[in-house]
Amino acid sequence: MQTSEKLSLPTMGCGTWAWGNRLLWGYDESMDKQLQEVFNFCVSNGVTLFDTGDSYGTGKLNGRSEQLLGKFSQEYQGLNKENICIATKLAAYPWRLTRQSMVSACKASAQRLGKNVDLVQMHWSTANYAPWQEWALLDGLADLYEQGLVKGVGLSNFGSQRLRKVYKKFAERGVPLATLQVQYSLLSTYPVTELGIKEVCDELGIKLIAYSPLALGLLTGKYLEKGSYPKGIRGLLFRQLLPGITPLTNCLRSIAESRNKTMSQVAINWCICKGTIPIPGAKSLEQATQNIGALSWQLDAGEVAELDNLAAKSDKKMVQNIFQTK
């Protein structure tokens, strides 16, 4: 039996991949209270979509991001509580080979959350390396909707061609495809400009979710000064990309100053103007406040066009997700 509950999606969400990354590199329980405050602040300000994944965390911490979100949503008693939508992505692990494996995975996520998953998504397509594995997992997603265990189903890192095939298969079963999530920002326009994802989503009535809308922080302005790079591999990436995106970051700064906004807010608002639901990460109240400042206003057509032009001319682009299909 299909669920009769309606899946409601806000203009902007919160991507808990930021929490997931922190969990991968070492979990500190003292941060729980801070994260709860971030969650409460987001929901009370109308940001009610929280995106996570069952692969966030390793070892004993596997699924910890879901546990935290479940705890936070149950304890929250303020404004917009009824609108909280928790979306989780189920990993296409090599040992998940049957439709039942996806059903079981979603039930495990629901147990960690303490409630049914609102929006379940396939974390990535296996078409690039194991196409034979994919359809059974997709059948499992459709089973979850038919059994009323989720309000909606979606995909992540699927291109236009794969998207159409999955949409057709789901439609034959009477299962609507609610969302598609791709890496999308001013430095990662490939899914839209080259794969035509947005046009296909609009045609099929699918909401497009933009993850990493700030390009790992490159579009925040935080790392424009020499020597202020983050550590590790991320720092190496930033050293390679920042010199080639100077015209774009200068434009972002100029628009931000003219509107009394921040570069982050302009970059996120650009995603909203493009008809997507951006899900920037937030680990602190300061970051959450920054993100929410991207709402309740809109770039004009001239500003969007200027940013589009400079993004297209940028010498450097973000590295694409290796699982992104065509």
Image: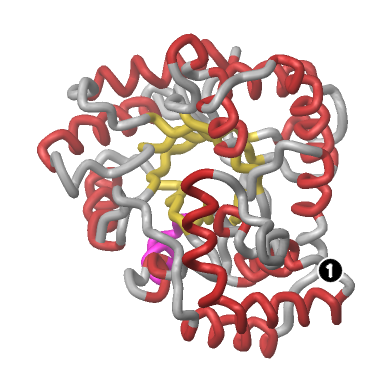
Q: Which kind of residue does numbered mark 1 sit on?
A: Lys
Q: Quadrant of the C terminus?
A: bottom left
| Residue drawn at (75%, 63%) of the image | 265
User: For this rendering, which residue is in front, 170 or 174?
Assistant: 170
| Residue drawn at (60%, 38%) of the image | 18
Q: How many marks?
A: 1
Give coordinates of residue 80: x percent, y percent: 80, 36
Density class for disc 1 (Cα within 10 Å; few <14, some 14-19, many ≥20) is: some
Span colored in magenta = 198-206
Give the structural element (helix, strand or loop) at label 1: loop
Give coordinates of residue 320: x percent, y percent: 37, 58
Give coordinates of residue 261: x percent, y percent: 84, 68
| Residue drawn at (34%, 20%) of the image | 103
Give coordinates of residue 162: x percent, y percent: 24, 55
Residue position marked by numbered label 1 in the rendering: 261
| Residue drawn at (48%, 57%) of the image | 237
Q: Is residue 64 left or right of residue 205?
A: right
Q: Is residue 289 left or right of residue 128?
A: right
Q: Quadrant of residue 273?
A: bottom right
Can you see residue 38?
A: yes
Q: Is residue 145 left or right of residue 46?
A: left
